[in-house]
Image (tube, rainbow, N blue to C red):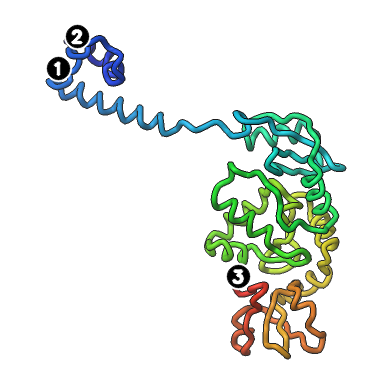
């Protein structure tokens, strides 16, 4: 058998598709011809590479149909397991396109279950959601860590991007964490609006800074006071009576009497003066 003939049958021989006599002829040739043997190795490597690219169909494409409903100007995609995507503004078509880009499938009109509707409504009113009911199986491990940590930031308080990175065990991944926060696919319910820059102030928001200010105010954050501290470069507030230092919005910091409040610009300044970090808000995690 010549090389040209053998090479046209290499893959069929590899997969066992040739008749016995032809398979033997190809095998004998490959044993004698080093060049054709190398070609067989190349074909096997290619087959393994192609197989590694195969992925299972998305859950929502093969098991069930996901649905979409609306509360005021907020679109909500959901499954029987929980919330899948939330977006404010735009048309249904735009939202469906956004959903298809994320999950690779279409949406059907549906009606939110009472528990899911309550979670979204409560979040929009600023009441917060303690345990969001989500269905984000397609998310990466890092994204889920970010989402779960965001959900644990208390209502009426804010944290920094660097704090968030530290909390998930990735202190050097502040930029990656910030990107996940910016791309939060279930805003309001998972409160990405509670994350602010380490330099202070409110920072940006997918739906605009005024919307972020409004959400924080509804949750009890004194936005004006927070921005005033940022202008003075104050990041932490300590108590003269307890020698404990907190984030300014921490529940414990809000209880400090005005005459006992000690402002700090950096963590080292507080440590040098003998203050210890609050165990509740863990300000020096950042």
**Nearer to me, 139 or 60:** 60
Whole-number angstrom distance, CA of label 1 to CA of label 3? 67 Å
| Residue at image location 46% in from the left, 31% down from the top | 54
Q: Secondary structure at mark 3?
A: loop
Q: Secondary structure at mark 1?
A: helix
Location of mark 2 (residue)? 21
Residue 34 image-quadrant placement: top left
Marks 2 and 1: which is nearer the front? 2
What numbered label is drawn on residue 28? 1
Comes first in the chain, label 2 or label 1: 2
Tag 3 near tag 2, CB within 8 Å: no
Whole-number angstrom distance, CA of label 3 to CA of label 2? 71 Å
Location of mark 3 (residue)? 286
* Quadrant of the frame with the C terminus: bottom right
| Residue at image location 69% in from the left, 36% down from the top | 98
Marks 3 and 2: which is nearer the front? 2
Callout 2 crowding tier (Cα within 10 Å): few <14, some 14–19, many ≥20: few
């Amino acid at each position: 058998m010549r090389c040209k003939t053998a090479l046209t049958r290499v893959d069929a021989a590899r997969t066992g598709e040739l008749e016995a006599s032809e398979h033997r002829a190809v095998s004998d040739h490959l044993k004698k011809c080093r060049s054709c043997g190398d070609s067989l190795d190349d074909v096997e490597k290619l087959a393994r590479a192609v197989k590694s690219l195969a992925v299972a169909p998305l859950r929502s494409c093969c098991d069930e149909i996901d649905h979409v409903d609306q509360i005021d100007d907020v679109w909500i995609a959901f499954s029987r397991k929980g919330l899948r995507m939330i977006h404010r503004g735009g048309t249904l078509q735009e939202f469906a396109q956004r959903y298809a880009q994320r999950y690779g499938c279409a949406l059907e009109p549906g009606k939110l279950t009472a528990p899911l509707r309550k979670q979204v409504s409560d979040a929009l009113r600023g009441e917060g959601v303690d345990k969001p009911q989500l269905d984000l199986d397609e998310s990466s491990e890092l994204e889920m860590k970010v989402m779960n940590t965001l959900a644990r930031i208390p209502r009426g308080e804010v944290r920094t991007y660097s704090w968030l990175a530290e909390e998930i065990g990735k202190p050097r991944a502040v930029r990656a964490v910030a990107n996940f926060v910016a791309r939060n696919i279930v805003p309001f319910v998972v409160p990405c609006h509670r994350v602010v820059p380490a330099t202070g102030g409110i920072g940006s928001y997918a739906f605009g800074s005024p919307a972020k200010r409004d959400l924080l105010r509804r949750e009890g954050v004194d936005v004006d006071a927070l921005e005033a501290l940022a202008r003075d470069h104050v990041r932490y507030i300590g108590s003269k009576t307890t020698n404990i230092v907190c984030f300014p919005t921490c529940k414990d910091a809000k209880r400090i009497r005005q005459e006992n409040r000690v402002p700090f610009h950096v963590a080292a300044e507080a440590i040098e003066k003998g203050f210890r970090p609050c165990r509740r808000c863990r300000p020096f995690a950042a």
